[in-house]
Image (spheres, rainbow, N blue to C red):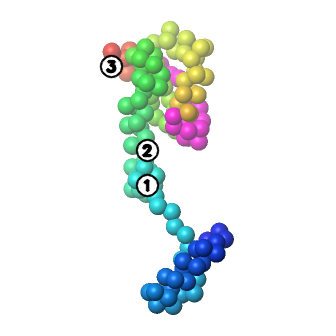
Amino acid sequence: MSSRRISREELSRWAVQRERFQLTDLRPPAPYRVTTPEHLLPNVMKKLGLEQPMWEQALLREWATLVGPQVAQHTRPGRLERGTLTIFVANSAWLSELRRYGEKAMLEKLQRRFGRKRIKGIRMNLDPDGPTQKR
């Protein structure tokens, strides 16, 4: 039973239902909430172990929107480990500029979209695959 107080109106409705359907339970059932698919799906994905791949796909799909098209041409998201997202940058000039002027704004945008609990920080490294091609 929920710790929520039951109103007189709810008790009256329950008394009518109990009499109409000849129910033996004297207490009304605990209140329930209807869950929409958008709230249900993340829990199901987490239980199936598919939350991380789903999140990574959303990040890849929205990367250009989150960081801007020009920055997206020279960067790509890497793995998320212990709350730190690695971002690969095409060359040292872009890496230097982003560290100086864009790191804080990029982190704020990512946290706004995916939450501060998921992305606690970012780390920028040169892209080990070399310069990125136009995406």
The residue carrying mark 1 is 36
Bounds of the magenta span?
Answer: 113-127
**Rendered residue at 50%/85% (across/down):** 18
Residue at 40% over, 36% down = 58
Residue 100 vertical placement versus 112 (above, below)? above
Residue 20 shows in the view: yes
Hey, which quadrant is residue 96 in on the image? top right
- Note whether residue 83 is visible: no
Give the residue at x 37% y 21%.
129
Label 2 element class: helix
Q: Mark 2: few, some, or many residues within 10 Å (few <14, many ≥20)?
A: few
Label ID, residue 89: none
- Amino acid identity at mark 2: Gln
Which mark sits nearer the N-terminus, 2 or 3?
2
**Disc 3 residue crowd, few under 14, some 14–19, many 20+, Cα 10 Å:** few
Amino acid type of the residue tagged 3 in the rendering: Arg
Q: Does residue 17 belong to the magenta stretch?
A: no
Q: Which of marks 1 and 2 is nearer the N terminus?
A: 1
Residue identified by numbered label 3: 135
Which element type, helix, strand or loop, lies under badge 1?
A: loop
Q: Residue shown at 59%/14% (left/top)? A: 101
Disc 1 and disc 2 in contact, CB within 8 angstroms? no
Relative to 134, 24 lies left or right: right
The answer to whether residue 114 is magenta is yes
